[in-house]
Structures are given as structure tokens and as C-alpha cells.
Image (cartoon, coloured by chain):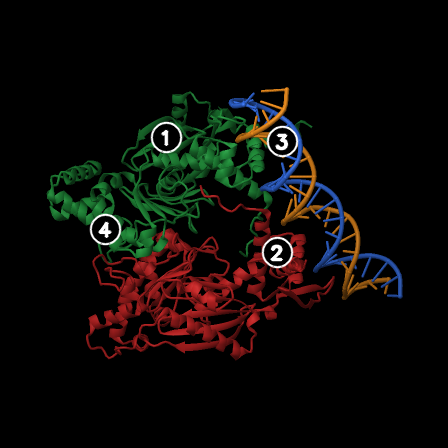
Chain colours: A green, B red, C orange, D blue
Amino acid sequence: MSQPKPRTTTRDIRQANRLQILHQLLLRKSSTRQELTRLTGLSTATVAHLVGAMLAEGLVVETGVEIPQIGRPTTILALNAAGGACVGVDVAETYIHYELYDLMLTNLARYDLALPSSKIEPEEVVQLIVTGFDTLLAQAAMAREKVVGIGISIPGPFEHATGVSVFAPTWGWANVPLKAMLEERLEIPLYLDNPLKFNAIAEAWFGGGRGIDTMAAVVLGTGVGAGLVIDGKLYHGSSNTAGEWGHTIIVAGGRTCRCGNQGCLEAYVGAPGILQTLLEIDRSSPLHFPGDQTRSIEAIATAAAQGDAMALEVVNRTAVYLSAGLGSLINFLNPEVVIIGSWVGALLVPIMWEKLLSLVERQSLERPYMAARIMVSDMARNSVSLGAATSVLEEYLAKEGRRSKRRLTEKGAER
Amino acid sequence: MSQPKPRTTTRDIRQANRLQILHQLLLRKSSTRQELTRLTGLSTATVAHLVGAMLAEGLVVETGVEIPQIGRPTTILALNAAGGACVGVDVAETYIHYELYDLMLTNLARYDLALPSSKIEPEEVVQLIVTGFDTLLAQAAMAREKVVGIGISIPGPFEHATGVSVFAPTWGWANVPLKAMLEERLEIPLYLDNPLKFNAIAEAWFGGGRGIDTMAAVVLGTGVGAGLVIDGKLYHGSSNTAGEWGHTIIVAGGRTCRCGNQGCLEAYVGAPGILQTLLEIDRSSPLHFPGDQTRSIEAIATAAAQGDAMALEVVNRTAVYLSAGLGSLINFLNPEVVIIGSWVGALLVPIMWEKLLSLVERQSLERPYMAARIMVSDMARNSVSLGAATSVLEEYLAKEGRRSKRRLTEKGAER
DNA sequence: GACATTATTCTAACACTTAGAATAAGTCTT
DNA sequence: AAGACTTATTCTAAGTGTTAGAATAATGTC
């Protein structure tokens, strides 16, 4: 407020309107000027004007006409899917997942790479990203020049202002200037952030958060966290760590969490926490496969579905813990939608659904509970890669006149 | 996003710029066109233009000149404090507090009314607000016509869309159309909300939240809660109940809270919760004055300050609970500032300060903790009444051309 | 071919902000 | 007291937008 903020100008209005149109085209795959007028609330003149500019830019194409019973046919518009490509890379602790998309975010290629469980140096990760990117392009025979940007998800907090990966817990990284390192090798626009944020973006654009203003996209996997969307925008917080819901304390003085604190939600409803609950019930449970979290959680899910008492007990206790966390979240944030995602969520939450809902209802206040629609993510695709690609695409779409500006500069240089 | 939102127009830009100038004038008491240019980042032309309009409207006045060593003197500008008045009313469970302010939010009069501890009907409260308002005006010899609006804080959730007070716990109210009832009696613009929101607004404008984008204003009194400011604006949530932090669960299966749930933060760090902690330590503690919460908490504070072991134990345990709630809040919201307010906060937090900070540090992640400045509120004034008046004043200032528009309408009627 | 209907583009009006020129209001110098 | 200098404020014209309504386009029907 006291800082000399960038001024708001009429250009910002145009930009926002433009992005609104592009959003709709992305979500609906195709549309018409008339429909866009209704959807955006803009005048037909404005829509025609902006669409005209996008057609000239090559960002949008006319894909056909719709002939009505009577009257002039309506031109059908769509994003120029082939006008470029974008990439989402999900760097996790045990793998790197690469996905290539066109400008309508249709998946064109994907590629997986397992990481060794040992410590890994930043340089190695950079190298793997670079070579994996090349492999991905080769797979789809995509020209490098067509890629408008790469979104990269990295574990741990990321600082946008400096481009620094602040802390990657399992690898012991601290303050790695990852963005600069990558920029040196990949001369393409980059967008880095952590998977919670990207998952939330994917849900907001393509999942249960479509058209929703306020949402929490909860991740229930090995780790636990949330990405928050407020007023239709991803909320970063003051140092880009908002949404660290997994370290909400639900049992004062309870289990020790990997963050060093006691009683964190993650220590109860993250995969290792759930397995700990299992072992507390039965130290030698046959559902537990040491060293294989995924298999163990799957075993619990299967057994519970078949009515196994021990598995059900684990699921029920987990529901109690989870509902405490969800209730607090709903009370505090008062979101329209809460979407539960990631693999543990997908495996276990459907089994505990009824119980979970009634527990959340009990553990939250009436009004916020009534306002919140709780759901399990229905995204078929890899939400982190998709969200990463979406972020970089959004940056690309937002900036107008990329091409024409460049042309202008070239003209300027010719003189 | 799919609803036909109101369009953004250039008027909105003007409105925002106007409000920015008025904000600065309100915060600084007086300023100059030059200074406003620097503070807002607008051009001198725009500032002069907007200030010109406000002078014509009578909203701003030139209060003098500042004669520099050299050059043309600078005109000093200020809000036209005497141009109107606004009122903040804080309806609590045991009292109603009325305050009258001028347009620079300088307090002109105040008035208190004790409420009986019995149940009270909506009609009675409406009546008391109306007569109290008259008393307040009489006290300051203020003409009723000069009041531009009344901000009213009521306990429990309030629904802006319908003007309904959803639920006032102690009085057993449910879905009372309070706004309509008041509007019928007071033909003056009204703004209703609950005290958490108004306290946050007061802190954001005049307390530790000045110039801060993201903030949580925590209230530690009989009840516990927070008001959230995000991106410089009060955050309401999807059904205007965001910030219900007091019912965050910190001890799964713990104490029963008055909300019916178990283990809520409020059951541990609200005044009754703290007294329960005291009685758990010593069932017949001399620090406990049955039926007099305030006195009991004061007694604990005094005894702890003098080194009384039992009081210190109560304070320490409270610090442990409170830090769990604060840590979770800081992790989840990642605010720039956390301000602890209300009477229990004022009495006990300074005593536990060092301990509390180190506990919060331990119970939150490093980055969000480092980003958050935690502080005890330093507002001398009644923050709820002030925030209520501020809200209504802001609405008044935001709308341009109130007077001139009215004039136009009158002209229109003359024809 | 005239008419009806719907889509799209064109035109002129209107609402802003703002760079830079012009003007205003002082002090300082001579 | 006139002119130089300095800073504040206003004025002017240009630039960027949106948009209502007129004009035009494209189709089917009679």
C-alpha cells in the first residue's frame, strides 16, 4: 500500500478480458463469439475486437461454422492447439514425470524416469530435466522452438522472487538457485513451484474447482498439504508457503512428525502415519509390507473393502484424524469446495466416505460445513504435470502481442 | 467465472485510485498532492484531477499551505472531518457499546449500555440500538442528517446477501432478518458483520496491519477467532464465516467445546478454557472467582507476573495450546503479520511472550514462521466499534458523486 | 428476389490516465 | 522592482480502453 505499486491501467482491463476469453476457450475446447459474449459478460463488440486480435496473432483459429435453422451461421472458434506446445515436469523424490501438451492442454507425450533413492545433487536433477525434456520432444517429434514454456514442480518450498528452491527435505538441498541453473540450460520460459500449488491449479482449471472462487485442493499422499485458491486465483501467501496444512497440529504432544514437531496431521494421515496406526493396532499385521508404502496402503484398502476388521479399524481411525484436519480447514477458510487428491486419498477416502462426512460435519461449524462441498478428485490425468503446464501456458496466454511485438522490434532493428 | 459478473470498466480504475487517495488522507490525517502522487504511484495530473473532484464534492478540504525554502507553496489537503459523521456499534453478549466519529475517524462521543444476562429478543436489541444511537447523537449535539452510516457488530455469523443474523448463540437467535428490522427504524446506510471481521478491519487500517497485504487478526477473549486480510482486503469466505480459528481442533478427542465439538482451541485458550486449566491444577484455587471471568483472568495475570507457581503453570499450559493454534495458522495462511487482540490476549500474552514465541517457532515450519511478525495489538481504541465505523465510512467514500448525483436527480425532478 | 433472422464488423461516443506544456506562486539576486 | 529560479498545479492533447447502435454479412424462407 505504501510501496509504489504498478499502476492499474486500461490495458489491465483488456488483459483480464482477453484472459477470460482464452480461459473459456481452453475449458470448452471450442466456442463462438456469441457464446463468449454470454460467458464473459462483455459486449459483442469487445469480444469481436479481442478475438480479432487473437486470430491475427495466430493464437485462436476459426475451425468451422455452425449452421442454424435460420440466420447467419456462427463461426466456431478454438485455441490454435498446434500453435505451440507446453511441458509439465513433476520432479518427485522417487521419480521425474514429464508431459508434453499442445496449447489446448491435450496430452501429446509422456515420459517417466525413476530416481535412485540415494541423495541426489541439484546439478544431476538439472541434467535429468534437460535430457528428459529432449527425450520427450523426440518422442512426439515436436520442434523445440514450438515449446512456449516449461512448468516444473519441485518438492519443498520455492521462492519466486529469487528463483531459489529453498529446501528439499529428502535431498538435503538448501537455497539452490534452481531457476537460474535451469534457465542457463533451457532457454525457454520456466515456471517453478511446488506440487501442492500445481495440483490446486489443475483442480481449479480442469477438476472440481472449475468456476469456483474459493477452494482448497488437499493432497493426501506420502506427504500431506493443500493448495488454496482464493477469489479465483492461486493464493501464495507472503513467502509462497501458504497451504501447509499437513503440519496443522491435531494432537497436542502427539506423534513426532518428520518436520520435527509433534502431533501434526501428516503424522496421522500421510501414508507413513497410516501405517504407524496399523502397526499400533497389530505390530505384525500381514497388511504391512515393510519398505513398500504403496503396496501396504493398497492392502489396507482392499482388506477394508472386504470387511477385514483390522483394516476397517485403521481406516476409521484415519477418518477421525482426517476429519479433524478437514473440519479445521473448513472452519478457517470457509471454502466452496474441498477436493481430496493424490493416491492415498484416492485409495482410502472412498472407503471411509460416509463416516468421514459425518465426522467432518460434527467437527466443523454448521455454516462453513454447509457451504463446503467435499469431494474426491476425479482427475484422470497427472494433476501436477498438468498444473505445471497450465501455469506456464497461462503466462504465455496472458501476455499479448508476443509475436507482433517481436515483429515490431525486428522492424525497429531494420531501420 | 461462469456467472455474468459485473464488467470491469475504467470507472473501476478511477474508483480504486480515488479510494487509494482517501485511504492515505485518512491514515496520515493530512497530505499534499505531491505526497499523494508519491504514495499512490499515480501521475500528478491524475491526483490533481481526482482531488479536484473531491474538493468540489466537499469530501476533502484545503487546510493550509506549507511554505518551503524556495518554490511555490504546497497546499495541504485533509479529509473534511466535519463533513459528516459515522457510528460504530458493538453489540456484545453483555453490553452494547456505541461510538460516534467524524469523517477522519476521530472519536466524538461514546456511550455504554449493560445488557441483562437473560435472553433477549431481537426486537429489544433493535430498540436499544435505535435509542442508544439517539443518545449518542444528543451527547455530541450531532445532527442526525450528518451521519453517513452506522456499522454494527453482532455476535455470531451474519449473512450479507440476505441481511440475516444467522445465529447468536447465547440468545438462541436463528435467522433473524436484523438488517431489514434496523433499516426500517434507522433510515441510514447500515453495515453489519461480526466482531472478528471488524476487529481485523480496525487492525488493518489503524493497527499493526497498516500497509500489510496478508494478516490474521486473532481475538483472544471469552471466545476465540480470527479475522483474515488477504491481498489488502478483508476475506469473507464463501459464506462469510472465514476465520473461525477458535474451533480448530488441537487435541483430538479433547475437552468439550461450547460448539459441541471436542478439542477445539477455544476450549483451551478462551477465558473459560483457561479457567478450566486453572481448576484442573487446583480445584480450589484462590485465583478463581466463580462467576467473574475477568477478575479471575486478571488474578492469574497478576499472580503470574509476581512469580506465583500455580499461575505460571496455567500461563505456560495456555502458551502450549495457543502456540499449537498459532503455528497451524501461520503454516496454513502464511501471513505477514499476526496480531493478537482482545482482553485475554492483552492480559496474558505479554507474560508468556518469550515462551510463546519459542513454542510457535517449534510448532511451525521455518519459512512461514520467519515470514510472520507476531505481535500483541497496540490499539488503544475500541477496535470493534472503530472497525464497524470504518467499514461504513469506506462504503461512503468509495461511492463517488453522492452529492452531485442527488443534485442531478433533484434537477431531473424539477423538469 | 424480397424478407426474416442471426452474426459480425464498423463507427462514433464516452471514460479514464498521463506526458508534457503552460501557468501559478512563491524566494532569491541584482 | 524586475528578472531568474524553483516548485506546485492545471491544462491540453494524445493514447488506451469499452461499447451502444448502425451498418453489413450470410443464411434460409416464401
Labels 1 and 3: the sequence-earlier one: 1
Q: Report the disc number at residue A409.
A: 3
Q: Report the disc number at residue A358.
A: 4
Question: Which of label 4 and label 1 is nearer to you?
Answer: 4
Q: Report the disc number at residue A334.
A: none
Q: Chain of mark 1?
A: A
Kindly indicate whether the residue at mark 3 contacts the one at mark 1 (C-beta within 8 angstroms).
Answer: no
> Is label 1 in a helix, a strand or a loop?
strand
Q: Chain of mark 4?
A: A
Q: Report the disc number at residue B38.
A: 2
Percent across and percent down for residue A131 are 39, 27
Q: Which residue is mark 1?
A: A98
Q: Alpha-carbon distance for marks 1 and 3? A: 34 Å
Labels 3 and 4: the sequence-earlier one: 4
> Is label 2 in a helix, a strand or a loop?
helix
Question: Which of label 2 and label 4 is nearer to you?
Answer: 4
Q: Is residue B399 visible?
A: yes
Q: Alpha-carbon distance for marks 3 and 2? A: 32 Å
Callout 1 amino acid:
Tyr
